[in-house]
């Protein structure tokens, strides 16, 4: 590796580390430096002095099956994910399409679990709530109950859509 290439890599890594630190304050410069693979011979011993974060990285998919099924949790993120088109032939499974999704979080068995949802009606209603300022996402998420109401025939075509009731929870302070 030439000195120019080495400087470019170092600059790219520094930019990335600065971005990671801004997006997640727990990743301090010292923490990122300590865990850098560039310092492989001095990586910390993870068996002591570390604890598991309350939320795993993997995301499940919430697909309600019964009318009245409820999800008690928080909307933490709205994203666009690249996914294969539903119901397409196997030879087209490699073709990906942008799909708007929301990420929900809830406590389950003492752990925080993440779920992704892409039902268009639910995502659209959540987005409307965010735009109206009634639902807050990310660090200060709004507690919700989402109830599956079943499928209903669309008025404009022959298709059916899943429908949901979204209720915002607020803390009751007894005085």
Image (cartoon, grey):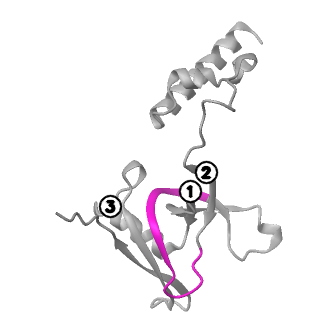
Residue 120 percent coordinates (x, y): 50, 73
Residue with the mark numbered 1: 111
Residue 99 percent coordinates (x, y): 57, 64
Q: Earlier in the sequence, mark 2 or mark 3?
A: 2
Secondary structure type for disc 1: strand
Q: Closer to us: mark 3 or mark 1? A: 1
Instruction: Spot the residue most to the top.
Output: 3
Asked if 152 appears above or below 40 in the picture, the reply is below
Residue with the mark numbered 3: 131
Secondary structure type for disc 3: helix
Q: Closer to us: mark 2 or mark 1? A: 1
Figure quadrant of residue 49 = top right
Q: Earlier in the sequence, mark 2 or mark 1?
A: 2
Q: Nearer the viewer, residue 140 or 90?
A: 140
- Report if residue 71 lies within the magenta region: yes
- Which residue is at a point 45% across and 91% down the rendered structure image? 155
Instruction: Give the tally of numbered discs.
Output: 3
Q: Nearer the viewer, residue 3 or 56?
A: 56
- 6 horizontally vs 141: left or right: right
- Which residue is at a point 46% across and 73% down the rendered structure image? 122
Q: Are marks 2 and 3 in contact (CB under 8 Å)?
A: no
Residue 134 visible in the picture: yes
Figure quadrant of residue 17 = top right
- Which residue is at a point 56% across and 44% down the rendered structure image? 53
Q: Earlier in the sequence, mark 3 or mark 1?
A: 1
Residue with the mark numbered 2: 56
- Report if residue 49 lies within the magenta region: no
Secondary structure type for disc 2: strand
Residue 133 percent coordinates (x, y): 28, 60
Residue 4 percent coordinates (x, y): 68, 10
Bounds of the magenta segment: 63-81
Q: Are marks 2 and 1 in contact (CB under 8 Å)?
A: yes
């Amino acid at each position: 590796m030439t000195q120019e290439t080495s400087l470019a890599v170092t600059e790219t890594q520094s930019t990335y580390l600065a971005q990671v630190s801004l997006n997640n304050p727990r990743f301090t410069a010292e923490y990122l430096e300590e865990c850098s693979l560039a310092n492989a011979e001095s990586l910390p011993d993870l068996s002591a002095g570390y604890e598991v974060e309350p939320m795993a990285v993997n995301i499940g998919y919430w697909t309600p099956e019964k009318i009245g099924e409820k999800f008690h949790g928080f909307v933490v993120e709205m994203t666009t994910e690249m996914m294969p088109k539903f119901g397409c032939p196997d030879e087209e499974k490699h073709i990906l399409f942008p799909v708007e999704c929301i990420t929900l979080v809830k406590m389950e068995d003492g752990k925080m679990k993440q779920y992704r949802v892409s039902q268009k009606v639910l995502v659209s209603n959540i987005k409307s709530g965010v735009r109206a300022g009634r639902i807050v996402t990310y660090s200060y998420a709004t507690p919700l109950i989402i109830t599956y109401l079943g499928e209903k025939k669309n008025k404009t075509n022959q298709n059916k859509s899943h429908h949901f009731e979204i209720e915002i929870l607020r803390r009751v302070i007894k005085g």
